[in-house]
Image (cartoon, grey):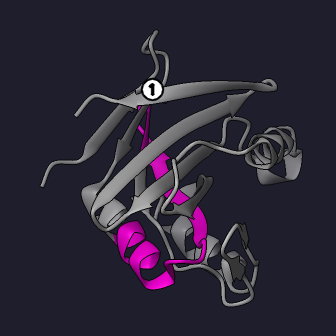
Amino acid sequence: MDNLIFQDKCETFTINLEYNAYEQMLQYCVKSNPNETGGILIGNYSTNQGIANIIQTPPPPLNSKHAKYNFSRGTKGLKETLDIAWKNGQYYLGEWHYHPNAPADPSYTDIKQMITFSNDKKLKCPEPILLIIGGNLNNWKISISIFSNKERTILECKR
């Protein structure tokens, strides 16, 4: 299967979601339903920095909290996962989570958290990606946004 490509209307931002990473997220969603789940996005950037490639979606950290209308990503094991990714030329790109049997639209809390992440100098990720999967096994929905300078840019699937 082909990768999924997302772009904003001005084609300023492009995200290449590798199909294997997408399939892995869907497996986590099926397993977690009816509770939310999620995790981090790991990947790299094209040589000209114009394309973010989402390559990995590790399992939710063991100390994450899953509930029907809430997901709180834990941190247990993340440093080790990111250290290994770094050695392979891959980096933290952002966050993803699942809205079971619901739209893939980010909540106010989701947006506020991502703006906070984009301003956190320690994360070294000034333009974090937020990927939300909604729906269920019969009808998956996906939304992707990038947060930069307190602004949210919505990307649409091109293929």
Give the residue pinned by disc 1. 50
Taking the image as shown, residue 51 lies to the left or right of residue 124, namely: left
Can you tell which quarter of the image residue 19 is in? bottom left
Residue 55 x/y as whole percent: 39, 58
| Residue range of the region highlighted in magenta in the rendering | 24-53
Above or below, 134 against 137 in this view is: above
Residue 34 x/y as whole percent: 53, 77
> Could you tell me which quadrant the C terminus lies in?
top left
Can you tell which quarter of the image residue 47 is in? top left
Residue plotted at (66% across, 42% down): 128
Residue plotted at (79% across, 52% down): 123
Above or below, 14 against 79 in this view is: above
**Farthest residue in the left direction?**
1
* Kind of residue indicated by mark 1: Gly
Which class describes the residues within 10 Å of circle 1: few (<14), some (14-19), or many (20+)? few
Taking the image as shown, residue 144 lies to the left or right of residue 63, namely: left
**Farthest residue in the bottom direction?**
62
Taking the image as shown, residue 56 lies to the left or right of residue 61, namely: left
Residue 26 belongs to the span the image colors magenta: yes
In the image, 1 versus 102, the foreground residue is 102
Residue plotted at (71% across, 45% down): 107
Taking the image as shown, residue 37 lies to the left or right of residue 156, namely: right
Above or below, 126 against 57 in this view is: above
Residue 139 belongs to the span the image colors magenta: no
Residue 127 x/y as whole percent: 67, 35
Can you tell which quarter of the image residue 46 is in? top left
**Residue at disc 1, secondary structure:** loop
